Amino acid sequence: MNILIIIAGLAVALLMAGGQLALKGVANLRLDGAPIFRLIVSWQFILAILAYGSNVVLWLWVLTQLPLSTAYPFALFGSAMVPLGAAVFLKERLSPKFAFGFTLIMVGMVLAISGGSV
């Protein structure tokens, strides 16, 4: 696997996590009682749409380069990045169990993408 594919896979993960964090920002606006129209014109909503749209295009390119079984760990990494982003940007607390689980995910991702397809 070449470095460009790895960078693209990591970008997919970051775009996925960024989209989720932006949507949480939209949800927080709603919790403050904002009307629906204000939500869909908010910078958080626009950022989420841009992140997800870019993510789909980039993910499609990654899938043209790798078997799904090899590419999918990048998507799993994106899911693991959401709580880290929540801790950094939203000041949510993470437990030691999360740190241990995240470490396992990282090790698993490295093993999965380095092993190629089955």
Image: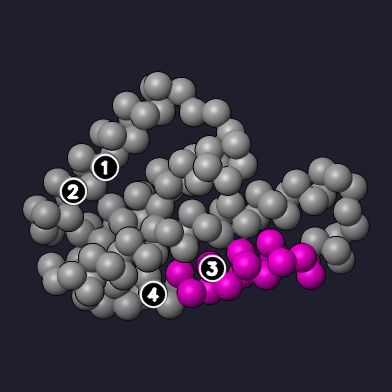
Whether residue 68 is visible, yes or no, is no
Residue 70: name its quadrant: bottom left
| Tag 3: amino acid | Ala
Label ID, residue 118: none
Q: Earlier in the sequence, mark 1 or mark 3?
A: 3
Residue 69: name its quadrant: bottom left
Q: Earlier in the sequence, mark 2 or mark 3?
A: 3
Label ID, residue 106: 1
Q: Secondary structure at mark 4?
A: helix
Percent of width and height locating residue 109: 23, 47
Cα gap from disc 4 to disc 3, whole angstroms: 10 Å
Residue 117 relative to residue 44: left or right: left
Residue 71 in the magenta stretch? The answer is no
Percent of width and height locating residue 60: 36, 75
Where 42 sits versus 29, above or below? below
| Tag 2: amino acid | Val
Percent of width and height locating residue 110: 18, 48
Secondary structure mostly seen in magenta is helix
Q: Which residue lies under the disc numbered 3?
A: 51
Q: Which residue lies under the disc numbered 2?
A: 110
Whether residue 22 is visible, yes or no, is yes
Q: Secondary structure at mark 1?
A: helix
Q: Quadrant of the C terminus?
A: bottom left
Q: Which residues are magenta?
A: 40-55
Q: Earlier in the sequence, mark 4 or mark 1?
A: 4
Cα gap from disc 4 to disc 1, whole angstroms: 21 Å
Q: Which residue lies under the disc numbered 4?
A: 58
